[in-house]
Image (tube, rainbow, N blue to C red):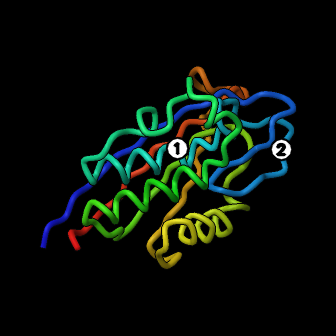
Amino acid sequence: MSMRVGLGFDLHRLEEGRPCVLGGITLPHPTGPAGHSDGDAVLHALTDAVTGAAGLDDIGTLFPDDDPRWEGADSAALFTEAIRLVHAAGWTLVNLDVVIATEGPRIKPHRVAMRARIAELAGVDAGSVNVKGKTLEGMGALAGGAGVAVQAICLLQGI
């Protein structure tokens, strides 16, 4: 049985007036991730984790930000397409684990909904998805609610 691990990372500035879409859900927050698509850094990091584990191209190659087709795109659609490509390459998803680092919005109240939505998009049980929020303790470039950074890892199993 063949197993592969993939790691993904994404980072977005938080801007006033943008919807705060993270983990495939919209959070009540005055700022949201800026990006060519909806800026969902969680789904972007997960997309890179699953495609990387399968030996496929990264999110920037598959869905380039200089392509007008992806302007304002729903990152859920990008992640779902990445999962389809992973399956087509002969892999099945075992689990996903995500760390969301930000000083706002708070992640804890939305973890269950994020896990459920990510699992739904990935076609796995919610028990195969974990989401954790971490504060930045007022340190670094993302301090003061300036942005969100996400690290994701996945495990794939050969079909």
- Furthest toward the top, the residue is 141
Q: Residue 66 is drawn in which quadrant?
A: top right
Point out residue 117 in the picture as x, y percentages from the top left corner: 62, 67
Q: Give the total number of marks visible in the rendering.
A: 2
- For disc 1, the marked residue is 44
Which numbered circle lies on residue 145? Answer: none
Query: Is mark 2 in CB contact (under 8 Å) with mark 1?
Result: no
Point out residue 65 in the picture as x, y percentages from the top left corner: 56, 28
Point out residue 35 in the picture as x, y percentages from the top left corner: 65, 30
Which of these two is toward me, 108 or 35? Answer: 35
- Is 29 on the left-hand or right-hand side of 76? right
- Is 153 on the left-hand or right-hand side of 38? left
Which of these two is toward me, 146 or 88? Answer: 88
Q: Residue 101 is drawn in which quadrant?
A: top right
Q: Residue at x 24, y 69 (%)?
A: 157
Tell me which numbered mark, 2 or 1, is placed earlier along the sequence.
2
Point out residue 133 in the picture as x, y percentages from the top left corner: 59, 51
The N terminus sits in image quarter: bottom left
- Furthest toward the left, the residue is 1
Looking at the rendered structure, the kind of residue marked 2 is His
The residue mark sitting in front, 2 or 1, is 1
The C terminus sits in image quarter: bottom left
Q: Residue at x 86, y 38 (%)?
A: 30
- Is 24 on the left-hand or right-hand side of 54? right
- For disc 2, the marked residue is 29
Q: Is residue 122 above or below residue 149?
A: below
Q: Residue at x 61, y 55 (%)?
A: 76
Q: CA distance from mark 2 to mark 1?
A: 20 Å
